[in-house]
């Protein structure tokens, strides 16, 4: 199951195309069209987060992504019965369980897989039995990785948000320490048999050191790519991200 030092998949998160659409209501820009362009540009999968308050992706977007996109859909969801029911209806390739608070601007912090074992266990089991690949969005923390194994989750996505925020703040030494923590967690998770992914906040500037972590099999990137699309176009932004990842991976392997 785990991929070690092999091809690094790119999942493109199209949530913020829906954010722009919803700023005016109506149908434009259409996140499904963005997903089609992302696939043409080399995305290995599409990621979409159906939030409880439907602030960006809608139920209809999920139905159309499942129907119209021939690459794997990674359905990001809170651990609620409503979202489990939607996942069971659509049977996406993958379900990534994330913490969700109504008042947050984006997903702040990872899931507490250790503290919420009893609540998460039936959800992980139900989604796995439905055939979806289940991942948990976690901080780079050994106890959380061990909790993911105890929950029977085959995949963990490591939260790179803090690493990216430290980069923006110019706190370079601490940023590099956080990158080291992500690398250590990826290696530890892989040693436990988990398939390791990472994402949140990644840019052309910050993706390289993360892509160079050989135990990672997939990165999920959204907000920066959609923003960059305003300046250079979505296809060009994704191709540039893909090339940047590949270059970092090749340099790390050399
Ligand atoms: N991975 C997870 C689990 C997320 O919740 C998000 C944000 O929706 C991302 C990756 C992508 O983050 P960003 O949009 O900042 O690239």
Image: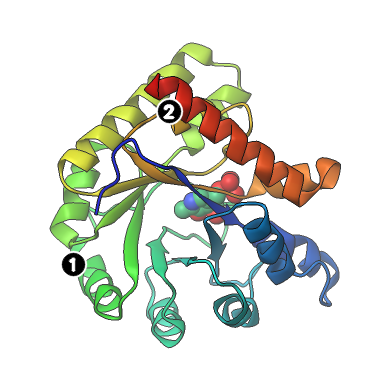
Residue that mark 2 sits on: 212
The quadrant holding residue 201 is top right
Distance between mark 1 and mark 2 Cα atoms: 35 Å
**Which of label 1 and label 2 is nearer to you?**
2
Q: Is residue 30 above or below residue 150?
A: below
Say which of 51 and 133 sits in front.
133
Mark 1: which secondary structure? helix
The quadrant holding residue 70 is bottom right
Q: Which color mode does the image show?
A: rainbow
Q: Is mark 1 within 8 Å of ligand 1?
A: no
The quadrant holding residue 24 is bottom right
State the image coordinates of residue 116 (x, y, percent, origin top left).
24, 60
Task: Say whether disc 1 or disc 2 marks the residue closer to the N-terminus.
Answer: 1
Residue that mark 1 sits on: 118
State the image coordinates of residue 232 (x, y, percent, origin top left).
82, 41
Q: Residues within 10 Å of mark 2 (few under 14, many from 20)?
A: many
- Left or right: residue 52 versus residue 2 is right
Mark 2: which secondary structure? loop
Q: Is residue 125 above or below residue 164?
A: below
- Left or right: residue 116 versus residue 82 is left
Q: Is residue 107 visible?
A: no
**Residue depicted at x 35% and y 22%:** 180
Q: Are marks 1 and 2 in contact (CB under 8 Å)?
A: no
């Amino acid at each position: 199951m785990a991929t070690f030092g092999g091809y690094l998949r790119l999942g493109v998160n199209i949530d913020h195309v829906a954010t722009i659409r919803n700023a005016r209501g109506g149908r434009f820009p259409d996140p499904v069209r963005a997903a089609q362009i992302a696939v043409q540009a080399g995305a290995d999968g599409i990621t979409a987060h159906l939030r409880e308050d439907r602030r960006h992706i809608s139920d209809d977007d999920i139905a159309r992504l499942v129907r119209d996109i021939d690459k794997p859909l990674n359905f990001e969801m809170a651990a609620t019965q409503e979202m489990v029911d939607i996942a069971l209806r659509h049977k996406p390739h993958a379900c990534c369980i994330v913490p969700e608070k109504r008042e947050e601007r984006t997903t702040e912090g990872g899931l507490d897989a250790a503290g919420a074992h009893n609540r998460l266990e039936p959800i992980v089991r139900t989604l796995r039995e439905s055939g979806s690949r289940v991942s948990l969005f976690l901080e780079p923390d050994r106890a959380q990785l061990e909790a993911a194994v105890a929950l029977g989750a085959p995949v963990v996505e490591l939260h790179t948000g803090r690493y990216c925020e430290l980069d923006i703040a110019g706190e370079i030494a601490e940023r590099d320490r956080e990158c080291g923590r992500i690398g250590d967690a990826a290696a530890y998770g892989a040693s436990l048999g988990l398939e390791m992914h990472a994402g949140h906040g990644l840019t052309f500037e910050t993706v390289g050191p993360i892509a160079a972590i050989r135990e990672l099999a997939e990165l999920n990137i959204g907000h920066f790519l959609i923003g960059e699309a305003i300046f250079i176009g979505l296809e060009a932004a994704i191709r540039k991200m893909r090339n940047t990842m590949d270059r970092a991976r090749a340099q790390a392997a050399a």
